[in-house]
Every structure is written in structure tokens, then in C-alpha cells.
């Protein structure tokens, strides 16, 4: 018999139930992933405590997030505003749960995201930074947030506008702008390697860009690099946060998003 998982336990139960077997599946893929990250750290001569795992739960139901929460995870990466806002409404009262927005963000969604996200990973323009600044300020004034919105700047490693990211030449001005806002907190950099470049080359370039930035903004110490397919390379090149979807959750439905 398949073991079924009852999510509705504990003082902050949500009443959400999940498919039988899913809890065991996620528990086993989570422990394999934690071991994989630890092995990558050992191979790179780094302390596993230096590399945070951000589970990426886009396209997967709130019940999966609740299972991961019961397994001790507190941070979840989402990349589509509407989907994420729905999950926040379902699960937002679980204590210490934090939502991190990792996807491309349109300015007209910035106000919503600034209400519930702890961190936005994909800030790549002054206009987006201004929209998040205004949204975070309003949320702070209304008491919806109590802390500034943490911001990672997304760096473009190939200048492809479709993939997002700020060019190296414009990075420092954008960093100054975010660091100068009281409602935003400059936390670091994020990048997605171009498809046609070796991850090692891309992450090495990113590490150089990050070192130059932290020499001016030491507080920008987070470097979010590495996904299911390339996290070992990212860890070798100083990643402090791997964003992992497929290797933890399974395959997502194929979409253009
Ligand atoms: C979906 C997504 C991920 C996770 O990718 P996997 O290859 O499934 O691990 C990481 N980062 C961003 C920005 C994403 O949109």
C-alpha cells in the first residue's frame, strides 16, 4: 500500500491534501539533492553551509510546497506572478515561509510581487527597480511588509534581450540605484548561462562580475547560480544559492514560458 501524506497536521495546518506517494517521492528526491549539493561543495573544497538550496516550485501545486515545508524547507522560488500569488494566498500563513521571485517580471506585476516576495532575483532595469521600489514602499507603509525587499540583479552573460539581464556596463549604475533605495536591499547577483556557452565559462565570467560588484557593494554577497543541470559548475565558481526545480520536483509541463 502506498503511504499517504496528511498535510493537515500541526497548529498551522492548511487543510490541503496531496496525492498518495508524493510525500515519499519528494522526501527521497530532496535528500538526494541535498547530498548532491554537499558532494559538489566537497569537490570544490567548500563548506556545504555556504550554498543554499532554493526549491523552484513553479508549475507544481501548493500541496507539493506544503510537503516540502513539512520536510523543513522554508524558502520557495516561483517565477509566474499569478500562480505565485495564488499559492501565497493558500500557504502564506505557514510560519516563516518565504517566497522568492526568480522569473522575469513585468513592471505592472511589481506592485503585487512587492507585497509578498522576500526577494526578487530578476531585476535588470532602472524602470523595474523603480516599480519595485514604489511597490515595496507602499507595502511597508501599509504594514504588509516589515523589511525591505531584497533584490538580486540579473546579469546578462550574452546580451540576449529575450533572456533578460542587465549588461555588465550598466550593472554598477543599477546597483547604486537599488542600494540607494530605503525600500530595497541590494543582496547580490543572479544569472542563467547562455545555452550555447559552457557553464564553467559562463559561471567564471559571472564570478568576475560579482567580485567587481562586491568590491564596491560588499553587502551584495549573494551569488545565485546553478540549476538542475549545472549546479556542480556553479558551486565550483562560488554560487551561494542554487535554484533547483526539475531535479527535485520532476519534469514540468512543456510551455513557452
Ligand atoms: C525554472 C527556473 C529554475 C529551475 O530550473 P531547473 O532546470 O528545473 O532546475 C531556475 N532558475 C530560474 C530563473 C527558473 O526560471
Image (tube, rainbow, N blue to C red):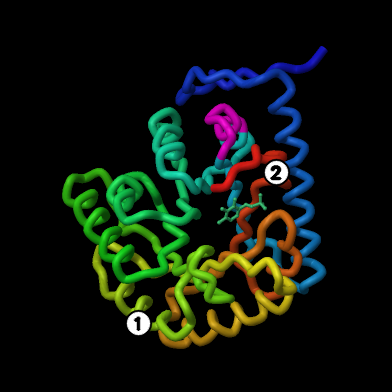
Residue 105's place in the image compared with 10, above or below, is below
**Label 1, residues with CA under 10 Å away: few <14, some 14-19, many ≥20:** few
Residue closest to the eye, 84 or 104: 104
Q: Tell whether position 182 is magenta.
A: no
Where is residue 80 shown, x and y percent of the image? 46, 45
Residue 170's place in the image compared with 50, above or below, is below
- Mark 2 falls on what kind of element? helix
Whether residues under marks 2 and 1 lie with C-beta atoms below 8 angstroms apart, the answer is no
Where is residue 207 shown, x and y percent of the image? 61, 79
Q: Would you say the magenta stretch is mainly helix, strand or loop?
A: helix
Q: Earlier in the sequence, mark 2 or mark 1?
A: 1
Cα distance, mark 2 to mark 1? 36 Å
Residue occupying the point 67% across, 57% down: 227
Does the beta carbon of the residue at mark 2 sit less than 8 Å from ligand 1? yes
- Mark 1 falls on what kind of element? helix
Image quadrant in which the N terminus is located: top right
Q: Quadrant of residue 236?
A: bottom right
**Residue identified by numbered label 1:** 173
**Residue identified by numbered label 2:** 248
**Label 2, residues with CA under 10 Å away: few <14, some 14-19, many ≥20:** many
Amino acid at each position: 500500500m502506498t503511504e499517504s501524506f496528511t498535510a493537515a497536521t500541526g497548529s498551522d495546518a492548511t487543510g490541503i491534501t496531496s496525492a498518495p506517494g508524493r510525500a515519499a517521492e519528494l522526501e527521497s528526491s530532496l535528500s538526494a539533492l541535498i547530498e548532491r549539493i554537499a558532494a559538489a561543495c566537497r569537490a570544490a573544497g567548500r563548506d556545504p553551509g555556504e550554498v543554499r538550496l532554493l526549491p523552484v516550485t513553479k508549475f507544481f501545486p501548493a500541496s507539493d510546497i506544503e510537503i516540502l515545508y513539512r520536510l523543513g524547507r522554508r524558502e520557495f522560488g516561483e517565477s509566474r506572478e499569478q500562480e505565485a500569488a495564488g499559492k501565497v494566498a493558500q500557504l502564506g500563513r505557514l510560519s516563516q515561509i518565504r517566497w522568492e521571485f526568480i522569473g522575469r517580471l513585468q513592471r505592472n506585476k511589481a506592485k503585487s510581487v512587492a507585497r509578498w516576495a522576500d526577494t526578487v532575483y530578476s531585476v535588470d532595469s532602472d524602470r523595474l527597480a523603480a516599480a519595485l521600489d514604489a511597490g515595496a514602499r507602499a507595502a511597508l507603509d501599509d504594514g504588509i511588509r516589515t523589511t525591505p525587499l531584497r533584490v538580486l540583479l540579473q546579469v546578462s552573460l550574452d546580451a540576449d534581450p529575450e533572456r533578460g539581464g542587465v549588461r555588465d556596463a550598466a550593472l554598477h549604475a543599477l546597483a547604486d540605484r537599488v542600494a540607494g533605495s530605503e525600500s530595497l536591499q541590494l543582496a547580490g547577483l543572479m544569472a542563467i548561462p547562455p545555452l550555447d556557452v559552457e557553464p564553467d565559462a559562463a559561471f567564471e565570467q559571472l564570478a568576475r562580475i560579482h567580485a567587481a560588484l562586491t568590491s564596491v557593494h560588499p553587502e551584495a554577497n549573494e551569488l545565485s547560480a546553478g540549476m538542475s543541470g549545472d549546479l556542480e559548475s556553479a558551486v565550483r565558481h562560488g554560487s551561494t544559492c542554487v535554484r533547483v526545480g526539475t531535479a527535485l520536483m520532476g519534469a514540468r509541463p512543456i510551455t513557452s514560458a
